[in-house]
Image (tube, rainbow, N blue to C red):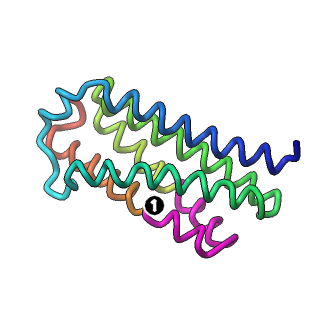
Amino acid sequence: MTWRIVACAIAVIAVIAYAGLSGVWVSTDQGWYLSLEKPWWQPPPVVFGLIWPYNFAALIAVGIVVALNAAPGKVAAFLALLVLSIVFAVTWAYLFYVPHSLAAAAVSLTVAALVTVPITVIAFSERWWAGALLVPYQVWLCLAASLSWGYVALQGPAT
């Protein structure tokens, strides 16, 4: 097994863990979430159902493209930043839905969005279309971070 195959596996496993852990925590306390006053710019629920499968598929596809084609240093940077971004995004899901620590959750998601910028840049540097695949994810994380801060403004840092 070459290091590139291992790198592909790391990217795929990280994104699958992201999807799984986010799903567990997002569904933890739906009653609480439904009772929250929503920021006016929050998209309708159907958008969430469409964007997340796309985001996870794009992250896996781009992770594989970078792992198979980039120089070793770029692959290492991409994977480290991807895992870091996922850790902060999953931490947001936990903080928001489990202890309802809205401000800490907003900080975590903001960091995830910022860490995703160099991931997108690396993807563009390898294949323009790989970077383009990540643009919706980058935009979504920025929107989600702004929504998270909107919840803080509407409800206060914790409920």
Q: Say which of 43 and 114 sits in front.
A: 43
| Residue 51 image position (x, y, % from top left) | 37, 54
- In this picture, residue 141 sits left or right of residue 49: right
* Residue 42 x, y percent position in the rendering: 21, 54
- Using a 10 Å C-alpha cutoff, classify the residue at mark 1 as few (fewer than 14 neighbours), some (14 to 19) or many (20 or more): many
Side (left or right) of 69 relative to 80: right
Quarter of the view holding residue 103: top left
Looking at the rendering, in which quadrant would you find the N terminus?
top right
Secondary structure, mark 1, is helix
| Residue positioned 62% across, 59% down in the render | 62
- Look at label 1 and name its amino acid: Gln
Relative to 135, say whether 112 is above or below. Answer: above
Residue 129, magenta (yes or no): yes
Q: Is residue 126 magenta?
A: yes
Screen quadrant of the C terminus: top left
- Which residue is at the far right? 2
When the figure is inspected, residue 133 is found, relative to residue 33, above or below; the finding is below
> Which residue lies under the disc numbered 1?
138
> Which segment is the magenta one?
115-137
Is 139 in front, or is 109? Answer: 139
- Residue 70 at x, y percent in the picture: 77, 63
What main secondary structure does the magenta stretch of the protein show? helix
Q: Residue at x 31, y 29 (%)?
A: 27
- Tell me: residue 52, above or below residue 103: below
